[in-house]
Image (cartoon, rainbow, N blue to C red):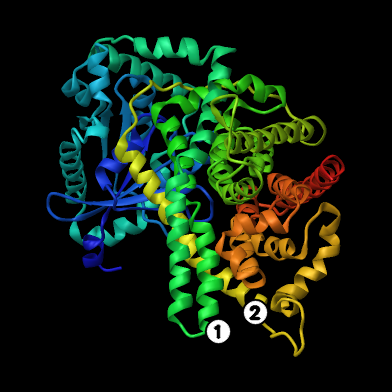
Amino acid sequence: MSIHADILSPTRIALVGNPNCGKTALFNALTGSRQKVANYAGVTVEKKEGTYLSPQGKKVKVVDLPGTYSLRARSPDEEVTRDVVLGKFAHENIPDAIICVADATNLHLGLRLVLELKKVGKPIVLALNMMDVARKRGYDIDIKLLSKELGVPVIPTVAIRKNGINELVAALEKEVGKNSSEIPTNDVNKEQKNITSNLKCVWTEPNALDVRSYHKEVERILCVANRKQGVASEWTKRLDSLLLHPVFGTLTLLFLLFAVFQAVFTLAEFPMEFIESSFASLQALVTESMPEGVLRNLLSDGIIAGVGSVLVFLPQILLLFFFLLLLEDTGYMARAAFLMDKLMGGVGLHGRAFIPLLSSFGCAIPGIMSTRTIESKRDRIITILIAPLMTCSARLPVYVLIIAAFIPAKTVFGFASLPGLVMFGLYLIGILSALAVAFVLKRFFIKGNVHPLLMELPTYKMPSLKNLFLGLTTRAKLFITKAGTLILALMILIWFLATYPNPPEGATLPAIDYSFAGMIGRFFEPILAPIGFNWQIAIALIPGMAAREVAVAALGTVYAISGSEEAVAEGLATTLSTAWSLPTALAFLTWYIFAPQCAPTLAVAKRETNTWLWPTVMFSYMFGLAYICAFIVFHVSQYFIG
């Protein structure tokens, strides 16, 4: 690398801070929409990178690192933060500077982290966040004196309002420039090559004596610079007295979950109908405007029927993520984990496992990734094994389709939607099943002690509309990209398998019966017949291994090709209500509660545990549960319903 290239390469900034200090809000304020989500090299921890332009017009990269209390790294999540800061990841540049974010209302932990980061030897700027909250509560911090005592620039910020962002950027630019000017130009390459080894010499993991000295130094600095100690939020105290109550708090949590599922089912009705009618109109336009042939069939029955049957569920998935992001942004998510600690401890799990499990309602992959915050390896493995039992958003299209086909849209108990109530029941079964599996694993297979839950409860705060918007936009892009790539490719493959070879002369059955897909479905039908599944379901389950929601698209394509035009025109839900019996529909729902139909989840579990043992255990026990429970539900319901 030339000196010229080194000078022109973008400045790389690491964003470090304790959990719940407003670090993500600061990242969003700095980068706006110029951000992307990826994984760190060799691990599955999600990293967020973004860019902004400095006052001099230079491009600056910002990496939002997982929250940590110390570089000592007692969990895998914290190990990633430490390794990025110390430049231990291959093929990733060492950060040129560090922004340490601290909650102005809780300086003890934040300042200790600053003292540790100073040992790294990189330029540091302390962003003293949530200053508006600190002032309201009566805190009086001498910023200049705090900066002098720490030996780093201190910038007060209110990230959600972008207050102090310009000052933070200017201070960072000054520190980076000051550091660069200390290195002679002809030594740039040498410095770049040797910086990693220099870091290893500078930073060593603090021992117990070092930690005590850090605490003493923090207390000394606070005595000097913190002129007036504030008081805790009265609203936080009042809300916690209710929301953390063993009885009322638990009932409130259950009510919130129930309300979320009711809202997901009812509020999304209009946008779903709009999307469904739009795709139906597009399908009709293609059919009317194109001559009959292979291309028209591919576009109409393959791509539009398949991809459209998945995209129609986008409103419900966004609503689900909206509520999850809202709970996290307000500070309630940590309370939910604290509240569930006793229940989780009853089945042998750590209360901190509740957050990964709750995250798995959105998707099991980030849920499994977030288990890296759990210190105990045994608890981490058990949480990984049961995370896929949480009803993820990929199951939502399947649930909504079957409920719409077989559950009447009526009100029960005077206020609750029956489809929403059934949806809540499906989610509840997934939760109870996960707890039961965790109990069995902890009791008989992966034994270990239950560790007490120690966590900091953040102050309640108003959610940031910008953070919610960016979070929803990211999820929408991921879902639409998935529909336009993986699902699209699979739909073309399924259409091909369901169309060819052509039926022989004199054939009396639908064309799909003579196709490759029909042959595959008929081959697996005897295996699935005991649980009430037909050969069309068999065709849908196979590509569903790539992603659960593909099963809906596959059913849309299969029935579009094999069904009558009148049935297809009325929609897939109507078609299934006539093609399936109610016991089959109930067995299908049961299968999807337990079945391990998500290859990416298994791959992430392998990467997280660094072995194929646990993904194999996950697949085996979930497949067994799915088949046995679907068998029981099908035959019991068939006995009573007929």
Q: Nearer the viewer, residue 536 or 489?
A: 536
> Which residue is located at x 80 percent, y 70 percent?
522
Quadrant where the N terminus sits is: bottom left
Quadrant where the C terminus sits is: top right
Q: Which residue is mark 2?
A: 499
Residue 119 seen by the camera? no
**Of label 1 and label 2, which has the lower sequence position?**
1
Q: Which picture quadrant has residue 30?
A: top left
Residue 616 seen by the camera? yes
Relative vertical location of residue 273 with respect to residue 546 in this rendering, above or below: above
Q: Nearer the viewer, residue 154 or 532?
A: 532
> Which residue is located at x 51 percent, y 26 percent?
256
State the SS at label 2. Answer: helix
State the SS at label 1. Answer: helix
Q: Nearer the viewer, residue 454 or 225?
A: 454
x, y (%) of residue 409?
Answer: 58, 40
Q: Callout 1 environment at 10 Å: few (<14), some (14 to 19), or many (20+)? A: few
Q: Contact, CB < 8 Å: mark 1 with mark 2?
A: yes
Q: Which residue is mark 1?
A: 294
Left or right: 421 with respect to 93? right
> Which residue is located at x 40 percent, y 30 percent?
18
Numbered-mark total: 2
x, y (%) of residue 579?
Answer: 71, 59
Looking at the rendered structure, the kind of residue marked 1 is Val
> Which residue is located at x 33 percent, y 21 percent?
107
The residues tagged by marks 1 and 2 sit, at their Cα atoms, a distance apart of 9 Å
Relative vertical location of residue 34 with respect to residue 451 in this rendering, above or below: below
Numbered circle sitting on residue 138: none
Looking at the rendered structure, the kind of residue marked 2 is Thr
Q: Nearer the viewer, residue 216 or 632?
A: 632
Left or right: 70 with respect to 494? left
